[in-house]
Image (tube, rainbow, N blue to C red):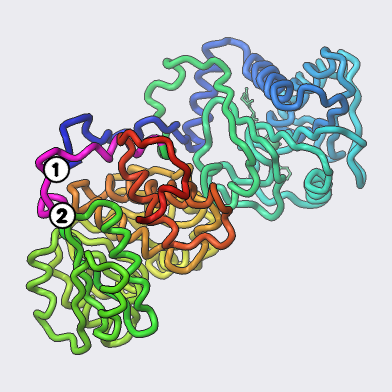
Amino acid sequence: MHAESAPGRSPSDAFPTGAGLFDIVTLRSIEARAAQRLGDAAELMRRAGQAAWRTLLEHWPDLQRIAVVCGPGNNGGDGYELARQALGAGRDVVVVRLDMHAPRSELAIGAAERYRADGGRVLVFESALPACDLVVDALFGIGLARAPEGQAVGLIAAINAAAVPVLALDVPSGVDAASGAVLGVAVVADRTLEFIAAKAGLATGAALDHVGERSLADLDLTAADREGRPPVAGLLKADDLACWLRPRRRDSHKGGNGRVLCVGGDLGHGGAILLAAEAALRSGAGLVDIVTRPAHVAAALARRPEAMVHGVDAVAEGLLEPLLEKADVLAIGPGLGLDEWGRKLFGTARGARRAVLDADALNLLAQGAPAPDAGVVLTPHPGEAARLLGRSAAEVQADRLGAARTLATRFGCAIVLKGAGTVIAAPDGRLRVLAAGNPGMAVGGMGDVLCGVVAALLAQGLDAFDAACCGALLHSAAADAAAAGAGERGLLPSDLMPWLRRLGNPLHRFPPTSPEAARDE
Ligand SMILES: NC(=O)C1=CN([C@@H]2O[C@H](COP(=O)(O)OP(=O)(O)OC[C@H]3O[C@@H](n4cnc5c(N)ncnc54)[C@H](O)[C@@H]3O)[C@@H](O)[C@H]2O)[C@@H](O)CC1
Ligand SMILES: [K+]
């Protein structure tokens, strides 16, 4: 990854092992091309039904009574095809539909007729689902156009209230597959089987509480069907860390591993910048300076003697210059505050070569303060992103991919939009989504750690987008590892430190050990 890393594969520009995530327009055009090649529009629907049946058998082989909730479009058609398979296998299957949701698309009408011709039962939903062992949700897929209303709301509520497993076909009904937003109400599935390709929206935001386990049936489409129709984003998994984090060169030295200057920690928030600094050290930065309030110096040194801690009360022009000159990267914002102290520090830090802006540095940016102009990574949570965009946090959450992309182009920076399904965006349009992280991370100080991790990776030579991707992934993977042993509730940002070190050396051959043994020495 840097002059200090042993030679190896350079970090891939494409997502290394993760899956591609597609937008809906691209998906529809892949589907249209495949349908044309097959010369039979119903063939893909048949394949979808067969794939769904295989998934059902794989995960719930013994369940006998199956209720398949079918909507009016092709998603419902997939449901009818699945119901035919179940019928053919001798299962007790019933299709449930709403009165107003009789099949409307030509393909769905055909599938429903075949199901009927096979002797299949159809029940119109009134207020309760029939007794069953499993529900298949084939109400709405990628064609959901607005929030479910009327009886559809009751039907979705009944699915969610049924104390049986739910298998969603393509999309949990009510989730917008493009953005991941929930349009009013949505099915909470145990498993979602997507067709043709993974949808970008299902990897982030509210969708994550609805999809359950995700799997994919590509319906045997060919490379030609996909040609010229690339994914909009890449899904990053913990295994991808090895692409960036190569072993160090044997003759590596501290100066070559980068110097990070951490600025922040106003009175009352001293721990924030300490967490960032410690995370930078544990993520491999060669040297770390902290500029904070003098009142915090002794405690910082007691906790982390490896850091060089500088106490500052009166901030004057040029104060940071000597440190900035030595630093490869500035990490500014954790605990910075919006008072005069924080404002002045932010104002005097403009000369940074490269920078990570977090927390109050983002709020100052949103208020119009100028940012350093090279190699910048912004790490907003949805509230900070909203302030930067002049929108509400709810609007950001309703379109996380779009918000991250807009921020990246507007500020010309790499963006890490935090929250479930973290989104990373580059000004050139590249997008990545993390398949790592857990709700234990929703605790004060977690973002400060991320700031330090990304800064350390920048300092070790990754460019802004790679440092953002690798840093966010390392941070979330460390949180997953830390939560695996003792649970999500009560997870502390400090708990990530030993795991940052361990996962930051993905190619190291560790002796067999327990997670406890990996704790900070
Ligand atoms: N065409 C094909 O050959 C294939 C289709 N597939 C399936 O087709 C789905 C897409 O099908 P469609 O485009 O027909 O769309 P959907 O079946 O997802 O839904 C569209 C239908 O629902 C109605 N609708 C949308 N929002 C509504 C709301 N809030 N309340 C009430 N009605 C609403 C629309 O008017 C339309 O009738 C995919 O998700 C996938 O499941 C896949 O199986 C692949 C093959
Ligand atoms: K569905």
Amino acid type at image mark 2? Gly
Q: Is residue 507 left or right of residue 478?
A: left
Q: Nearer the viewer, residue 35 or 363?
A: 363
Residues at marks 1 and 2 touching, judged by CB atoms closer than 8 Å = no
| Point 54% across, 57% down: residue | 440
Q: Assign a secondary structure to mark 2.
A: loop
Q: Which residues are magenta?
A: 239-257
Which quadrant holds residue 434?
top left
Label 1 environment density (alpha carbons within 10 Å; few <14, some 14–19, many ≥20): many
Residue 42 is inside the magenta segment: no
Q: Is residue 502 above or below residue 14?
A: below
Residue 183 is situated, as x and y percent measured from the top left of the image, at 65, 52
Q: Is residue 348 above or below residue 168?
A: below
- In the picture, the quarter occupied by the N terminus is top left
Give the residue number, with chain letter if any, for mark 2.
258
Residue 329 is situated, as x and y percent measured from the top left of the image, at 18, 60
Q: Is residue 454 above or below residue 59?
A: below
| Point 24% across, 55% down: residue | 456
Give the residue number, with chain letter if any, for mark 1.
4
Residue 139 is situated, as x and y percent measured from the top left of the image, at 74, 37
Residue 249 is inside the magenta segment: yes
Q: CA distance from mark 1 to mark 2?
A: 9 Å
Which quadrant holds residue 132?
top right
| Point 19% across, 89% down: residue | 314
Q: How many marks?
A: 2
Mark closest to the chain's N terminus, 1 or 2: 1
Q: Nearer the viewer, residue 481 or 320?
A: 481
Q: Is residue 134 left or right of residue 452?
A: right
